[in-house]
Amino acid sequence: MAEKQPVDLPVKYMKETGRDNFEDFCLDATRAIFSHVYYIWRTLKAALGPKAALDLYWKVWEGLAEVSFVQAKQVLKIDEVKDIPTLGKIFQYCWLAYPCIYNLKENTADSHVGIIDFCPNPEYGPTDNHMDRLDYYKQEAELSRRFVWKLVELAGMKDKVDADQDLFLCRDGCTDVCRVYARKK
């Protein structure tokens, strides 16, 4: 019996859908992920109501924060988070993995400021209902803030830094960036 050869799934997908390049594959995958996220939120909200849906949806985000934190520490070879610059590197890694464009504006002993110039969620999410999406992004903004706070907690820096996300591409309409920060208490 011949040994089964592993299938290169991206190549298989590209052939089956008539795609010519890997960039199209990545874009399709990103669109699919963010559409799924949006429709999960809509389903939870309809079934449970806004507050219970947000509480349940946070559990998904909280798990994502925990996995992302562990992965960031492994990839960046960080044993312990002792300072703001290290925490800033973890923030940057976590957002780049989603895949956002996260630029370090400041990363000093006293302060971290990260600027997200691109977020795939509002760029590639579904476009079916503008008002539903605005409500969804209001929830996403709250969850993004909780995500920051969870990373700080996991880093053991809750008593050492104030951290938050205070600008949101998807929610504010008056800004063209997201901003994440941490500063010494």
Image (spheres, grey):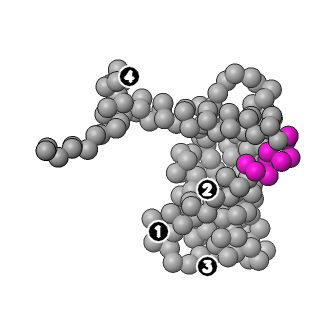
- Residue 60 % position (x, y): 67, 52
Cα separation, mark 3 vs mark 4, equals 48 Å
Dot 1 falls on a residue whose secondary structure is: helix
Q: Tell whether label 4 touches label 2 (CB within 8 Å).
A: no
Q: Are marks 2 and 3 in contact (CB under 8 Å)?
A: no
How far is disc 1 from disc 4 in space, using C-alphas? Answer: 36 Å
Q: Which residue is mark 4?
A: 17
Q: Earlier in the sequence, mark 1 or mark 3?
A: 1
* Upstream in sequence: badge 2 or badge 4: 4
Residue range of the region highlighted in magenta in the rendering: 49-57
Residue at mark 2 to residue at mark 1: CA–CA distance: 15 Å
User: Can residue 165 be seen?
Assistant: no
The majority secondary structure of the magenta stretch comes to helix
Q: Earlier in the sequence, mark 2 or mark 3?
A: 2
Q: Which image quarter holds the C terminus?
A: bottom right
The nearer-to-camera label among 2 and 3 is 2
Mark 2 vs mark 4, CA separation in Å: 30 Å
Which secondary structure lies at badge 4? Answer: helix
Q: Residues within 10 Å of mark 4 (few under 14, many from 20)?
A: few
